[in-house]
Image (spheres, rainbow, N blue to C red):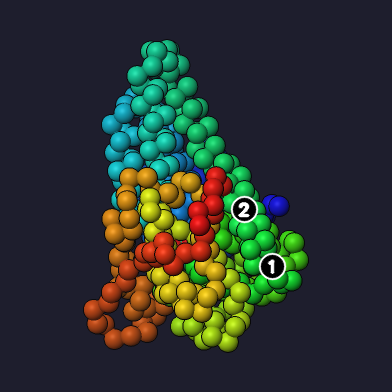
Amino acid sequence: MKTNLSFIKTARDKIQLVNQKLLPQKLEYVVCKNGTDVAKAIKEMVVRGAPAIGISAAYGMYLSAWEATKKNKKLNIELFQKQKQLLDAARPTAVNLAWATQEMLAVASHFFTSDAAKAKDAQIKLLLSLYERALEIHNDDAERCLTMANNAVKYLVTKYPKEKYNILTHCNTGSLATGGIGTALGAIRILHEKGKVNMVYADETRPYMQGSRLTVYELQKDKIPVTLTIDSQAAYLMQKKMVDAIFVGADRIAINGDVANKIGTYSLSVLAKAHRIPFFVVAPQSTFDKTIATGAEIIVEERPAQEVLEIQGRPIAPKVPVINFSFDVTPQTNITAIFSEKETLE
Ligand code: MRU
């Protein structure tokens, strides 16, 4: 299975990112020519979704080296370290970002400590290696999406057999958020391909509306039956037995299986448990943080008040203090299974 939708266009001297802030009204691209441009695009949510920001950051590291070379600057490891710091700080919760920049830094570190660094054409060789690694991170993600999505669907149809399913999903975990068909949305795409989707309920996902603006856009484009639902309606849909399973993505997964994902995921998991509905997480290995034991160690990003007080620049509330956690942490005990390209954790 393939998808015609991609969040990114790549070239040797720039990347172009779909401006996800403008979708679905406008399909416009933001041009990034270095890591600083990419960090800005990530911070401002032009590009979002854990794997997508990791992929963008990998190209950002490469582009900074390309730009420096064009300006006849000699590359050194400090440039890469600085770029990594800048990019990682753009959004702290999704670990794929720091993972991807670490992969790129490793390419540079390896190069500077090898004999290749002494060659006449050393800088060109380094640029090539960086570009190849960024491309690999990008292409690998497409492969991973397919594998994890298939794993998830196999599990669902075996353990919870049904002719057709009603699936609830939160945020956007599709081609706009990954290098391929998506994580949770990838599983939904595969399920649909098998003729087993009755309806996808897409949560709006306040305040950034990834569900209503992006998920609905992707599913409608693929002709997959979708119904938009407000976030606070989830409990009632479950009570009315309108949901057979919940599929979400992840931004960081701790060693014990606690999962950080878009704000509202935790409440869905509590509701799923109360209604005995299977709750599934689909995420690549690059989302697993092997350095933290539990979700309590996850730093949850807080976003500007403006995102809650305004909708597309229009005020919708008086100016009062706002609390705007971008993610929450779902305890592993609320999760039926986590699927990655490598394993299924029950
Ligand atoms: O704030 P966002 O839009 O970057 O949040 C995205 C999510 O929470 C997704 O569910 C997660 O990154 C998985 S995307 C494949």
User: Which residue is nearer to you in this view: 43 or 110?
Assistant: 110
- The relative height of residue 273 versus residue 283 in the rendered view (above or below) is below
* Callout 2: CB less than 8 Å from ligand 1: no
- Does residue 208 appear left or right of residue 132 in this picture? left
Residue type marked 1 = Pro
- The relative height of residue 291 versus residue 44 in the rendered view (above or below) is above
Q: Secondary structure at mark 1?
A: loop
Q: Is residue 198 shown to the viewer in this render?
A: yes
Query: Which residue is depicted at the point 71% across and 52% down?
Result: 1
Residue under label 1:
161
The spot of residue 277 in percent (x, y) is: 54, 74
Q: Which mark is residue 133?
A: none
**Among the 4 quarters of the image, the one containing residue 220:** bottom right
Q: Which mark is residue 151?
A: 2
Query: Which residue is depicted at the point 51% across and 40% down?
Result: 137
Query: Which residue is depicted at the point 42% across and 49% down?
Result: 288
The extreme left residue here reads 321
